[in-house]
Image (cartoon, rainbow, N blue to C red):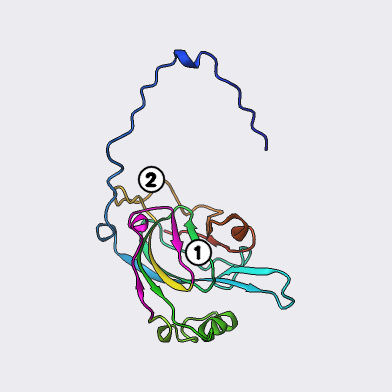
């Protein structure tokens, strides 16, 4: 794809009537939007292949090409517990969703017992998440205490994120049918991570 930008003639003759507003959009608080109807565990993986040549970057142990597992209902909100088993801070981006971090807590896994179990079984139940989700509560950064389309997920932690699949400005459903194909995706917003499988499909239903 190629863009050719040409200078606009007589630009100085055009009046600039734009203004910067004193306040931003008055978003509704988390408590004001529809209550969450679904809780999900989203696990971020980053492990080397057996030959230590390439890095696997997966979400819930799955690739983009694998079947959809996240199918929120349009017009509702969900609570996603995002478990970051990597050493990187991953900015999570959910297409069509609006996010707000509400809680951050460190995992306690000094021997990587939980991490190794998750890599093998990919099950927070089988790997007894509650035994490891007991580290210090981290303060949610001020910049995450609002509705956004990206939330940073610190390494070695569980970040609880409210995901609204609606218009948070008015707490109303989308004014279009968000359930049409081919659907959407959610992913890490680090470019080389999303390009290397840290991305999953997302399909809304009615």
Q: Residue at x 49, y 84 (%)?
A: 110
Direction left: furthest residue: 32
Q: Position of residue 62 (x, y in %)?
A: 59, 70
For this rendering, which residue is in front, 16 or 199? Answer: 16
Relative to 148, 84 lies left or right: right
**Looking at the image, do the residues carrying marks 2 and 1 touch, with CB atoms under 8 Å apart?**
no
Q: Residue at x 54, y 83 (%)?
A: 112
Q: Which residues are magenta?
A: 135-155
62 lies above or below 26: below
- Quadrant (top left, top right, bottom left, bottom right) of the C terminus: bottom left
First-in-chain label (2 vs 1): 1
Q: CA distance from mark 2 to mark 1?
A: 34 Å
Which one is nearer the viewer's eye here, 163 or 11?
A: 11
Circle 1 residue: 89
- Name which quarter of the figure residue 150 lies in: bottom left
Q: Is residue 151 magenta?
A: yes
Image coords of residue 197 (percent x, y): 62, 63
Residue 66, magenta (yes or no): no
Residue 175, numbered label = 2
Q: Quadrant of residue 144?
A: bottom left
Please tell me whether mark 1 sits on a helix, a strand or a loop.
Answer: loop
Please name whichever residue, 95 or 89, is drawn nearer the observer in this view of the structure: 89
Q: In the image, 154: left or right of 18? A: right
Quarter that holds the N terminus: top right
Residue ID at (55%, 79%):
122
Q: Which element is circle 2 on?
A: loop
């Amino acid at each position: 794809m190629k863009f050719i930008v040409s200078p606009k003639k007589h630009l100085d003759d055009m009046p600039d009537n734009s203004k910067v507003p004193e306040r931003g959009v008055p978003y509704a608080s988390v408590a004001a939007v529809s209550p969450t109807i679904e809780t999900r565990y989203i696990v971020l993986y980053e492990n080397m292949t057996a030959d230590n040549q390439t890095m696997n970057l997966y979400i819930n142990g799955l690739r983009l090409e694998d079947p959809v597992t996240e199918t929120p209902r349009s017009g509702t909100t969900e609570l996603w517990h995002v478990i970051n088993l990597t050493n990187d801070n991953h900015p999570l981006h959910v297409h069509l969703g609006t996010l707000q971090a509400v809680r951050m807590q460190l995992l306690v896994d000094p021997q990587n017992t939980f991490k190794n179990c998750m890599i093998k079984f990919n099950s927070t139940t089988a790997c007894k998440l509650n035994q490891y989700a007991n580290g210090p509560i981290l303060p949610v950064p001020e910049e995450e205490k609002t509705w956004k389309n990206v939330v940073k997920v610190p390494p070695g932690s569980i970040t609880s994120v409210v995901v609204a699949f609606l218009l948070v400005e008015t707490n109303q459903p989308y004014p279009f049918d968000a359930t049409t194909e081919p659907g959407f995706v959610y992913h890490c917003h680090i470019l080389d991570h999303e390009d290397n499988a840290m991305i999953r499909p997302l399909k809304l239903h009615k």
